[in-house]
Amino acid sequence: MNLSHAIEVGSKYKHQVIMSMFDQWGGSCAMGAAYEGTFGKDSGLFKGAMELDATLRMMYPVLREYAMCPGCGEDHAGSVHGIILCLNDNHLWSRKEIAKWVETIENRPRKEEEEEEQYAPPPAPVEPERELVPA
């Protein structure tokens, strides 16, 4: 599952909130929706926001990528994670709109070396030549 799909799935469970992953009335922001879309409804209710964020960052490396905020324009750039928060809290985008934007980031072309660094295998060990000693 990719992040955009997780946001869409999780957004079906609850109403949208701002400035908090979850609220006391059962709502969730875009990141809360991503968590519940990944792990199931109400799976993040009794966990701290830092723990939830850390889990999502490990599951979805796209959150660490660099992007421009489509709401702020060139005035705001940063991690996809930060841009999602900006779109949810400052621009009041729906989670479906945020998921569509995240999908554009997930589908943008990447250089092969950016996705996975390639290393040459280490050379095979060479045994030193042994001097033959007559018996």
Image: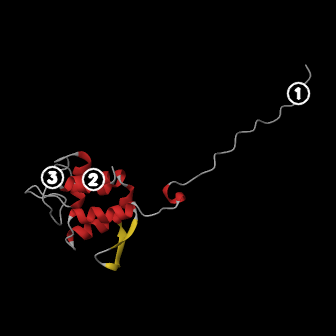
Mark 3 residue type:
Tyr
Q: Secondary structure at mark 3?
A: loop
Toward the right, the furthest residue is: 134
The residue that disc 2 covers is: 6
The residue that disc 1 covers is: 132
Q: Position of residue 119 (x, y in %)?
A: 60, 51
Of the numbered discs 3 and 2, the one sitting upstream in the chain is 2
Q: Secondary structure at mark 1?
A: loop
- Of the 4 image quadrants, the one containing the C terminus is top right
Of the numbered discs 3 and 1, the one sitting upstream in the chain is 3
Q: Position of residue 82 (x, y in %)?
A: 31, 67
Residue 49 is at least partly visible in this image: no
Report the side of 59 relative to 128 (left or right): left
Of the numbered discs 1 and 2, the one sitting upstream in the chain is 2
Q: Nearer the viewer, mark 3 or mark 1?
A: 3
The residue that disc 3 covers is: 13
Mark 2 residue type:
Ala
